[in-house]
């Protein structure tokens, strides 16, 4: 008899069912990080006694280590060796799916000259794009293309995947935002693009491929590297995050997308968690945003891509359209129709409403908050999204007494995109993203033409292009100084001037590349983390380096922060710096835990530097905060008949961890598939022997972790089937 395992993955927050096929390979691939560099013969001797392990790649530039393939047991034994720092399974990485250049100051930059009296266009700067490849034949990119490497097929042709059904466009879109130079202009239109194809058909790739791309980019000595890719593990110690830190140490400016898992906090994923990289969130460019004016209050409408303009010039009656099915749209002629999200596509809902005579469509969310989306084909009536709360209110009004509304359109920009992943980073309590840039409705190059896309993938290349401009203007600046210039001059954003987003949502704010290039002062580090409170220490000191880049004496002084009870700051007195002079200054934060009761304290320190104000975001954690205790769960076949194995990431470790089985119909507890206590933080990998498996059947599985009184869990459906040979 054999066991056959099929896993149906379902998230609590979605009705979508994803089928996860069984993994039948008897081996796995892992990344081994060494405590110090070793030669190839030394590495081969290290693994020589493990016949089940095959050496795949050796890394010397991106990190000190190598990738291997072998049985989980042999890999686990190798991980116990004295020379080994960590062993990480190969994770899957996915591509994170003209007006924006103006918003970040890109057009203003054209009037600035570099040290050789040339306008700033990125000329002489090389940007590495680690992505799905690049269509280097595109007329807007062929002049910028400077070669590349394919780490998927292991050759020197990094062309996008063109196979029907698996074709990719992502890397070409990213490259166009950075350096398109034709029908559309990128941020740095004369920068050179080196393409590294690390994500293959369908836009997927592995840790090993991305590491190999970073390794090659370091060897190629690119000036800037962009990674618009990521996974959902919020940990600072994953191999790609460590490799980006190494790239920065070698003089490369590393830019990474923060991820598209917002709007919740703790959602930033690797490599956006890399400490020394510039992690980028997404803001909105200038957009015409309609609002519904109803009984004296306004409700924000998020237009869907493909919608007609919301230029309705009179009040209209609202009608309840249910889910938007044809049979539900019987009385919508000449009205705005309110439809609930779900069951059928946005396009079907909108087409049905148009055919029934509706003047416009409002689709309200079936989960909390609003959403952004697109129509499969452009429509001749306006279609927009509403937050769930607004939709529920409108539905009650319609059903109770009927209601009319008027549409008002206003210009809006500098809001944080709902999908943009937020921090902080687990374990290090670091502020990520570092900055934000436009990432909504961004038009750029794709194979065969142009397309508007959205995501932090689109925001990151704005920053990579900005870094190319700064590097051209200041060729002697280090990656740390370039990052500081962008963060020191960023503009904090929010729904309105008095309601800014938190620092761990937007970092320092939206970049202003012209201000960054012309700054006369730099402060490093450009954000401050004071760590977590302990009983032994309620006073936290840190050092800041202040540089006067100008040709004149400058005076510096800190503004007194807004008074918070239980929080005391100590700053140096006002001081002056001579031209090109720098100084280290001490900042002290004191917390009285008897008075201050928040779990997280964050904000901006403001340093007056001549006529300018430099804002430095900071973060302090008083108690173990509410980050997810469990993430990145995967389940697969083991090496021996009847065995299975799992992997899970515990960002803070766990006092209690387990995989509990329930009857999916009655929710009755059946038993534990596995349990552990006092688990260290990081990746947990276990083998489940045959005798530990439950009886055949379908189970609701809860993967839970408990730490500091807080328990989090993930739900999955697993079916164990028994069959005879």
Image (cartoon, helix red, strand yellow):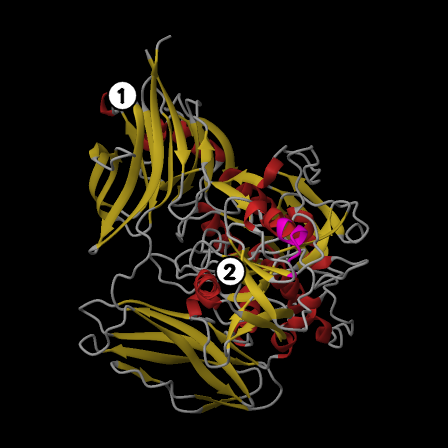
Tell me the number on the disc at residue 461: none
For the N terminus, give its image quadrant.
top left
Q: CA distance from mark 2 to mark 1?
A: 43 Å
Q: Which residue is mark 2?
A: 279
Closer-to-camera residue (696/545): 696
Taking the image as drawn, is residue 450 in sight? yes
Q: Position of residue 382 (x, y in %)?
A: 65, 61
Q: Position of residue 122 (x, y in %)?
A: 72, 64
Which element is circle 1 on?
helix
Q: Nearer the viewer, mark 2 or mark 1?
A: 1
| Residue 106 left/right relative to 577 | right
Instruction: Indicate yes or no whether the magenta region holds residue 262.
Output: no
Taking the image as drawn, is residue 199 in sight? no
Q: Which residue is mark 1?
A: 690
Q: Magenta segment, which residues?
A: 352-359
Residue at the image point whose x is 38% and y is 88% from the top: 560
Is 237 situated above or below 541? above
Residue at the image point whose x is 69% and y is 37% from the top: 156
Closer-to-camera residue (484/362): 362
Q: Position of residue 535 (x, y in %)?
A: 18, 68
Is 11 situated above or below 253? above
Closer-to-camera residue (178/415): 415
Is 573 situated above or below 420? below
For the C terminus, give its image quadrant.
top left
| Residue 551 left/right relative to 396 | right
């Amino acid at each position: 008899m054999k066991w056959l395992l099929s896993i149906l993955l379902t998230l609590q927050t979605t009705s979508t069912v994803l089928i996860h096929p069984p993994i039948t390979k008897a081996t796995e691939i892992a990344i081994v990080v060494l405590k110090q560099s070793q030669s190839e013969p030394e590495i081969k001797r290290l693994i020589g006694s493990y016949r089940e392990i095959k050496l795949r790649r050796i890394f010397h530039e991106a990190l000190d280590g190598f990738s291997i393939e072998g049985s989980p047991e042999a890999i686990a034994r190798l991980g116990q060796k004295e020379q080994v720092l960590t062993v990480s399974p190969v994770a899957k990485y996915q591509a994170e799916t003209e007006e924006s250049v103006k918003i970040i100051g890109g057009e203003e930059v054209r009037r600035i000259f570099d040290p050789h009296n040339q306008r700033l266009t990125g000329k002489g700067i090389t940007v590495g794009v680690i992505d799905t490849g690049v269509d280097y034949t595109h007329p807007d990119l062929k002049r910028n293309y400077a070669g590349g490497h394919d780490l998927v097929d292991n050759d020197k042709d990094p062309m996008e995947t063109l196979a029907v059904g698996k074709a990719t466009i992502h890397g070409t879109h990213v490259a166009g935002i950075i350096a398109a130079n034709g029908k559309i202009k990128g941020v740095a239109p004369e920068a050179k693009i080196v393409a590294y194809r690390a994500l293959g058909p369908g836009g997927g790739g592995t840790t090993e491929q991305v590491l190999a791309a970073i390794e090659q980019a370091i060897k190629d000595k690119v000036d800037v590297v962009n990674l618009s890719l990521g996974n959902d593990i919020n940990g600072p110690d994953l191999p790609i995050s460590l490799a980006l830190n190494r790239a920065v140490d070698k003089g490369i400016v590393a830019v990474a997308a923060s991820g598209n898992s917002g709007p919740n906090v703790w959602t930033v994923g690797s490599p956006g968690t890399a400490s020394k990289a510039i992690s980028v969130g997404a803001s909105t460019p200038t957009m015409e945003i309609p609002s519904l004016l109803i009984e004296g209050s306004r409700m924000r409408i998020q237009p869907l891509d493909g919608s007609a303009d919301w230029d309705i010039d009179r009040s209209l009656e609202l009608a309840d359209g249910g889910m938007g099915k044809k049979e539900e749209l019987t009385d919508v002629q000449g009205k705005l129709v309110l439809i609930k999200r779900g069951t059928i596509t946005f396009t079907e809902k909108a087409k049905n409403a148009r055919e029934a005579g509706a003047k416009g469509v409002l689709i309200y969310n079936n989960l909390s908050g609003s959403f952004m989306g697109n129509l499969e084909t452009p429509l001749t009536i306006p279609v927009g999204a509403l937050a769930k709360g607004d939709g529920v209110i409108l539905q009650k009004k319609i059903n109770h007494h009927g209601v009319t509304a008027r549409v008002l359109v206003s210009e809006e920009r500098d809001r944080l995109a709902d999908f943009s992943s937020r921090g902080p980073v687990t374990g290090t309590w670091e502020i990520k993203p570092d900055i934000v840039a436009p990432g909504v409705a961004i038009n750029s190059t794709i194979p065969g033409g142009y397309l508007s896309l959205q995501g932090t993938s689109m925001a990151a290349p704005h920053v990579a292009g900005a870094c190319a401009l700064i590097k051209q203007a200041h060729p002697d600046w280090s990656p740390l100084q370039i990052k500081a210039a962008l963060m020191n001059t960023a503009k904090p954003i929010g729904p309105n001037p008095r309601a800014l987003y938190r620092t761990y949502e937007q970092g320092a704010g939206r970049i202003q590349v012209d201000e960054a290039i012309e700054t006369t002062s730099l402060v490093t580090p450009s954000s401050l983390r004071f760590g977590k409170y302990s009983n032994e220490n309620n006073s936290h000191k840190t050092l800041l380096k202040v540089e006067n880049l100008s040709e004149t004496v400058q005076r510096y002084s800190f503004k007194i922060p807004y008074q918070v009870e239980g929080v005391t700051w100590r700053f140096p007195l006002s001081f002056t710096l001579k031209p090109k002079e720098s100084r280290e200054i001490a900042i002290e934060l004191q917390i009285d835990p008897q008075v201050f009761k928040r779990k997280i304290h964050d904000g901006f320190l403001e340093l007056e530097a001549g006529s300018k104000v430099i804002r430095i975001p900071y973060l302090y954690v008083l108690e173990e905060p509410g980050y997810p205790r469990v993430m990145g769960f995967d389940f697969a076949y083991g090496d021996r008949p009847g065995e299975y194995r799992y992997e899970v990431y515990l960002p803070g470790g766990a006092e209690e961890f387990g995989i509990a089985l329930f009857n999916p119909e009655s929710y009755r507890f059946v038993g534990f598939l596995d349990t552990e206590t006092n688990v260290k933080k990081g990746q947990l990998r276990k083998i489940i022997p045959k005798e530990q498996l439950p009886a055949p059947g379908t189970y609701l599985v809860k993967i839970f972790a408990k730490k500091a009184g807080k328990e989090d869990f993930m739900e999955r459906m697993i079916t164990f089937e028994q069959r005879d040979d």
